Amino acid sequence: MSTRPRDALTLTEKAKSIVERWREVEYAGVKVSYKQRLDGGGSTFGQDYIAWLKALEMPRQGRVFEWCSGPAFIGFSMLAHGLCDTLFLADINPWAVEACRRTVERNGLGGRVTVVHSDNLEQVPPSERFDLVVGNPPHFIDRLEGNLRAFDEGWEIHRRFYASIGRFLTPTGVCLIQENAQGSKTDDFRRMIADGGLDLVHDGFGHPPPGCHPRFYYVGSVLNGATPPAWLPKR
Ligand SMILES: C[S@@+](CC[C@H](N)C(=O)[O-])C[C@H]1O[C@@H](n2cnc3c(N)ncnc32)[C@H](O)[C@@H]1O
C-alpha cells in the first residue's frame, strides 16, 4: 500500500473545482454533498443499483465498497436505504474525497463510513474486507481522452482493479460493477477477471435489469470456486 495517490487533476480542473459551488441531493434522509463536475452519473443511472438490488431481494450486506466513488451517490444511497451496515469509499480525485467527507460530517456517519483518497486500490488498507463491491468506473477507452470521470486508457483502471480486488473480498464477497454498453461488453473484462482469480458469475450485457437505464449493464464476479449468492441471477 503506497501512502499517497498520484496527482490526478490538471491545473484547469483544480481551478474549476475550487470555483464551483457545493450542491446537495438527498437519499432516504442522507444528504449527499457534491459538485456538478464530480457527478459521473451516480445521481441518475447509478441509482438503478438501489431499485435493482431491492428487486433482487439482496439481503442487507455488511461492508460495501464503492470503487471510483466520486461523491458516492451509490454508496450513500445504499446505506440510506438499509442495503448495508457500513461503507468504504475511495477515489483518486481529492475533491470527490472532500465531497464524501462533507457528507459523512453533515449526516453524522463517521462510525459507519470510511473515506480514502486512493489511486484504484493502492491506498486501501490491507486489512479491509468487503462483502459487496459496487462501482460506476470510467467507461470508455475510445473517447473522452483525459477525462478523469470517463476515460480508462487501454482498460488499465479496470485491469488493476480486477488484479487486486480478490484480496479484499470476504470468502462470499461479490463484485457487481456497472458498465456502459456504449463503451464496452462483458468480453472486454472476462480475461482480467479470470487473471485476478475471480469467476464471472453475472453477465448482464444485453440484459439491463427491468425498469433500469437500458444502456447500462452489470458484471458480477466472486472468488474462484466460491458459490455465487442466491440473490444474483446469471444474467
Ligand atoms: C464515471 S465517474 C463515477 C463517479 C461516481 N461514482 C458516480 O457514480 O457519479 C468515475 C470516477 O472514477 C474516478 N477515478 C478515475 N480514475 C481513478 C483511479 N485510478 N482510481 C480511483 N478512482 C478513479 C474518477 O475520479 C470518478 O470519480
Image (spheres, rainbow, N blue to C red):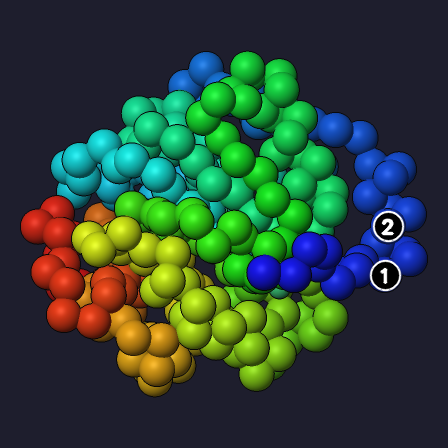
Is residue 230 depicted above or below 47 in this figure? below
Q: Which is more toward the observer, 131 or 128?
A: 128
Q: Quadrant of the C terminus?
A: bottom left
In which quadrant of the rendered view does residue 217 lie? bottom left
The x and y percentages for residue 109 are 51, 20
Query: Can residue 70 be seen here?
Result: no
Q: Does residue 70 appear left or right of residue 187 in this picture? A: right
The x and y percentages for residue 93 are 70, 51
Dot 2 falls on a residue whose secondary structure is helix
Dot 1 falls on a residue whose secondary structure is loop
In which quadrant of the rendered view does residue 184 lie? bottom left
Q: Residues within 10 Å of mark 1 (few under 14, many from 20)?
A: few
Residue at left offset 59%, top offset 60%: 1
Q: Does residue 44 appear left or right of residue 211 in this picture? A: right
Is residue 178 depicted above or below 27 in this figure? below
Q: Residue 10 — which label?
A: 1
Q: Which residue is mark 2?
A: 14
Q: Residue 69 — which label?
A: none
Query: Can residue 83 be seen here?
Result: yes
The amino acid type, in three-letter code, at marker 1 is: Thr
Residue at left offset 56%, top offset 48%: 90
